[in-house]
Amino acid sequence: MKIDRLIGILSILLQEEKTTAPELAERFEVSRRTINRDIEDLCKAGIPIRTAQGTGGGISIMDGYRMDRTILTSKDMQVILAGLRSLDSVSGSQYYSQLMEKIQTGSSEFISGRDSMLIDLSSWYKGSLAPKIEVIQGAIENRHLIEFKYYAPSGESNRRIEPYYLVFQWSNWYVWGWCLDRKDYRLFKLNRMDRVGETDKEFACRNVPMPDLSNEKIFPGGIKVKALFTPDMKWRLVEEFGPHCFTEADDGRLLFSADYTDMENLVTWLMTFGAKAEVLEPVEARNIIRRNAEETLKIYGGLA
């Protein structure tokens, strides 16, 4: 990712008296043009970088500039390394491990004791997610369109987007970008994307708004749900909705109340409880579950 490369370049410039664009390009496996853009970005951020052409020239930080590492406590370093390690858990390369080694070099006085925070962002789908993340990261960095086949509840479609952000939210990975087909910003779930590819078509960056990831925006509610659950399902309700989503009824069952955003997802979720849940509202969900049960009984009713 670009921010990681910027940190890496700054680290090199602080440790070495001078370097060159070709050396940095080879080290970070990018083009000289990309390195030149990175140097410009570091200058804009207030880092006093000096470049000199010709024999003996190169890239260096102006004399007198130092980053005081004592501002980073041991706890600060542990948190930084935990964050990098979490990204490496889904990375398709060893880049983050290498970056951790660079940060740790010469910083042993800041890192003591065992790790107290372990974050693993991988999932059952790591094998398929890592290549997608790597492709999307490259496309964002190169400002290239990506294309893919997308599977949504409304159907399948082929999409082309300008990718801007990789997002990890609600235990899933998404890409946020401008959809050329819908002429608007969209959030796409990586697990629903297939045949993800970076094209050679460049795009000019828009004034991109940050994705609104609030629950109210993504899960607007609108469907009032009331259902009774058997007491042995309390752990699931607490895990998925918190300990305040239900009250105890007179018969010992748990009266659950919540807002839901999609009828299909609501019915699917309720049916995972089998006979341990009774829907009270909405009536439409109750009727759909009854029809599904009747159709299922037709399939399995004749079995001994």
Image (cartoon, rainbow, N blue to C red):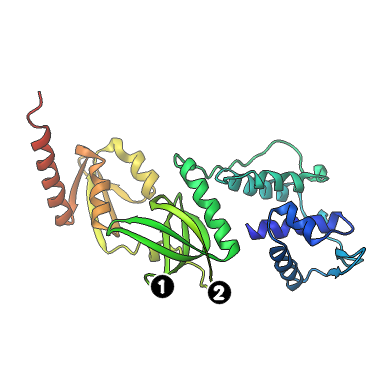
Image marks 2 and 1: residues in contact by CB distance under 8 Å = no
Q: Is the residue 149 above or below the residue 51 in the image?
A: above
Q: What residue would you read off at disc 2?
A: 204
Left or right position of 71 against 223: right
Q: Is the residue 9 above or below the residue 229 in the image?
A: below
Amino acid type, mark 2: Ala
Q: Is residue 252 visible?
A: no
Please state, as top left, top right, bottom left or bottom right, where the C terminus lies in the image: top left
Q: Which residue is rendered at x = 24% and y = 55% of the image?
A: 225
Q: Which residue is rendered at x = 47% and y = 59% of the image?
A: 175
Where is residue 234? Give x, y as percent. 33, 40
Q: CA distance from mark 2 to mark 1?
A: 15 Å
Q: Is residue 197 visible?
A: yes
Q: Which residue is rendered at x = 14% and y = 51% of the image?
A: 288
Q: Which residue is rendered at x = 25% and y = 40% of the image?
A: 273
Where is residue 130? Give x, y as percent. 52, 46
As rendered, which of 227 and 155 lies closer to the eye? 155
As rendered, which of 94 and 285 lies closer to the eye? 94
As rendered, which of 137 and 25 lies closer to the eye? 25
As rendered, which of 285 and 94 lies closer to the eye? 94
Q: Is the residue 78 above or below the residue 219 in the image?
A: above
Total marks shown come to 2
Task: Estimate how packed mark 2 is, as few (under 14), some (14 to 19) or many (20 or more) residues with alpha carbons within 10 Å.
Answer: few
Amino acid type, mark 1: Asp
Q: What residue would you read off at disc 1?
A: 184
Q: Give the SS element for disc 2.
A: loop
Please state, as top left, top right, bottom left or bottom right, where the N terminus lies in the image: bottom right
Left or right position of 298 against 107: left
Which image quadrant is residue 238 in?
top left
Which image quadrant is residue 23 in?
bottom right
